[in-house]
Amino acid sequence: MKPAKGTYPLYFDNYIPLVKETDLPLALTNNWLEIKTVISAIPVSKDDFAYAPGKWTIKQVLSHLIDAERIFAYRALRFARKDPQQVLSFEENDYAANAELSKRSVKNLLEEYEAVRKSSMYLFNNLSDSTLLLSGKMASGETSVLALGFIICGHATHHLQVIKERYLKNNS
């Protein structure tokens, strides 16, 4: 089941509709397979490529996806455990600027991303339907555990589209 509108802030309509699957475990798996396929095909020469001045490099995009997934999964865990405290937001540009990526490769980041995704899969795949419907407070509004799982997939899909369109097309 996909999260119903109203179980997450309107902002996340940028991501959730990008997920074709209605089953969260299948969405997490298929999304990972697409990520792995796209990122594995990026030549090493593009590791530090940015499509324009001031834009993130491919390594920074991957690091952002890893950080964001960890944060979304952490939020889901808190909401699943009925933690009543509002979770804090994060500043993605500060995270990207402080990721210390100079000695890392896209291949290394992809390996870390796989570990993070497997962890997310274990988390979401072992939650009951009733737990997936629990929600918690984020700075942007009430969000369900289920919505966070779909946000993880949709957010990654959004960035994969950007990678395909702006980093890989006509920039060989």
Image: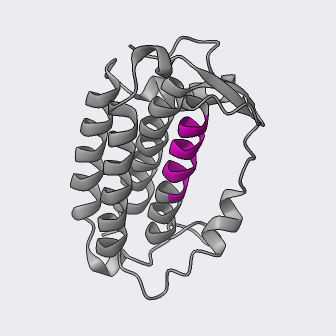
Pick the residue in front: 104 or 44: 104
Q: Is residue 169 visible?
A: no
Q: Residue at x 59, y 12 (%)?
A: 5
x and y, in percent, of residue 96 in the image: 61, 68
Pick the residue in front: 55 or 78: 78
Q: Residue at x 56, y 46 (%)?
A: 74
x and y, in percent, of residue 68 in the image: 55, 51
Q: Does the magenta-highlighted stretch encompass residue 73?
A: yes
> Which stretch is magenta?
67-78
Pick the residue in front: 45 or 112: 112
Image height of 29 relative to 70, above or below: above
Q: Residue at x 71, y 53 (%)?
A: 90
Residue occupying the far bottom of the picture = 103
x and y, in percent, of residue 167 in the image: 41, 62
x and y, in percent, of residue 39 in the image: 29, 60
Image height of 55 relative to 121, above or below: below
Q: Does the magenta-highlighted stretch encompass residue 136?
A: no
Snapshot colouring: one colour
Q: Is residue 55 visible?
A: yes
Image height of 126 relative to 21, above or below: below
Specify the quadrant that holds the C terminus.
bottom left
Specify the quadrant that holds the N terminus.
top left
Image height of 145 relative to 91, above or below: above
Pick the residue in front: 132 or 12: 132
Q: Decide whether the magenta segment is chiefly helix, strand or loop.
A: helix
Q: Is residue 140 left or right of residue 59?
A: right
